[in-house]
Image: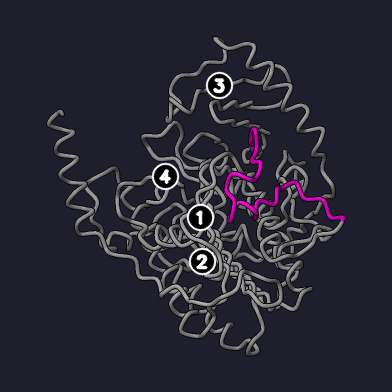
Amino acid sequence: MTLRSALCAIVLAACQGSAKPADLPPVPEGVAPPEAGRTSVLWIEVCSLRADRVGAYGNRWPISPNLDALAARGMRFEHVVPAGAWTRPSVASLRTGLFPRSVDIDRPRAEGESLKVDDSFVLSSEWLHDRGYRTIGLSANPNGNRYFGFDQGFDVWVDSGKLYTGWFEHREDVHDVTDRLLAEIDASPEGQPFLAHLLLSDAHHPYPRSAMLIPTDMPWMPADQNLYDRQVRKVDAGIARILRELDARGRRDLLVVVTSDHGEGFTDDHAQWHGAEMYNAQTWVPWIMAHPGLPGGVVVPGLVQTVDVLPTVLGLLGVDPGDYRFDGLDLHAAWTAPDSVQTRPFAVIQTAYDETLRTGLVDPTWRYLVQGEGPEAPRELYRWATDWQERQELSAQEPELVARFDALLATWKEAHPPRASGYLDEATVDEGTWKALQELGYLERN
């Protein structure tokens, strides 16, 4: 063992020894498996949360004790790829069970054109509102606001309200969102199940200077990672608070869903931040579910995508979608028989964040990226399974793989044409939302 390795081991042991334990409420006893009309749903999307920053997914630093405990109580999917590389298309996919291409919400646009979720799509809120649920939607990210079609089917909808100024110093955090959620729960009729959609932006850059005040047991690391990990710890503690407060209110028949819209790249990754990039740092996210009436410690191997979340939630609740055709897979049977479900042979992710349509294909070994459209667009190929940071580009050495992946993508695109297009009247969007998008770095994607 080298001196550096020994020092790292000592620091890790010290950090683990002083790690704050999980602070979740006790697991309720005697709760039946989930059922629509009885079981409430807490659906949390943590913007920019990388899977490898969560202990249940292998992070050695103790910054997510509550998410780790939640995974131990329920089920987590091991390899989850988002359907989009930035918030708006990815959230649209999560809540419709369709790829962004199907929703036609992320493509190169004509001048002055803005895209939203068309009213013809059925969102998660609408599936459950029609079955007697009180539906509550709270967004702390302006790309998840009502202007982009995300308020469909909600009894209560609250846009991100505070301006993103001074390094996000005044943004809404997990505790602001929690306070509003609990007020709405307290105002709900007794006995009525609820669906609460929370879009949290604490882990989204730029990070607030106040993050330096969050206690941490981690060693020194580059500033962007240090602030990010402190924000992840804050979100983790905030989620625990939500669950304790709901438990205190007797809301124990609760299906909890925690996932993310995309990851985040740091200074030592292949590419920094997110949006136009589709490398490992940006496209491996967590997906954790828990319910007291179902077993814990379940890990589902294989490749899945966030487009699978909605069909799986509906499957757990026993909601029959009838003739409605999702792009996502219903994987709910994995909770009691993890090896019984067929996961994906490959995942596809697209982004037109910078007005160039980029497409990625990920299988259990390879990542293939097409940086544009047409045969002349640059191609990149990485053996991500053994080259996590994807430093060695192999497209020139593997022409047969490139041809095979091109053929797979052509078939996939043909199978997923746009179903409908929603257009946003930019004049209806308030100045605060535009300013918030600018502070987030999304001004190019109004």
Q: Which mark is residue 163?
A: 2
Real-space Cα distance between discs 3 and 2?
40 Å
Helix, strand or loop at label 4? It is helix
Above or below, comparing residue 206 to residue 214 in the picture: above
Q: Considering the numbered disc 1 on the image, is that residue within a helix, a strand or a loop?
A: helix
Closer to the eye: label 4 or 1 = 4
Q: First in sequence, mark 4 or 1: give its number.
A: 4
Q: Nearer the viewer, residue 435 or 252?
A: 252
* Residue 101, x across and y down, in percent: 75, 42
Q: CA distance from mark 4 to mark 1?
A: 26 Å
- Point out the residue furthest to the right here: 323
Q: Is residue 91 above or below residue 399?
A: below
- Say which of 388 and 72 sits in front: 72
Distance between mark 3 and mark 1 Cα atoms: 33 Å
Looking at numbered disc 4 in the image, what kind of residue is underneath it?
Answer: Asp
User: Label for residue 381?
Assistant: 3
Do the CB atoms of the residues marked 4 and 1 lie less than 8 Å apart? no
Alpha carbon of mark 3 to alpha carbon of mark 4: how far? Answer: 22 Å
Q: Secondary structure at mark 3?
A: strand
Measure how far apart labels 2 and 1 are at the Cα level.
9 Å
- The three-letter amino acid code for the residue at tag 3 is Leu
Q: Which mark is residue 257?
A: none
Quadrant containing the N terminus is top left
Q: Residues within 10 Å of mark 1 (few under 14, many from 20)?
A: some
Magenta-drawn segment: 323-349
Q: What residue do we see at 53% from left, 40% from top?
A: 283
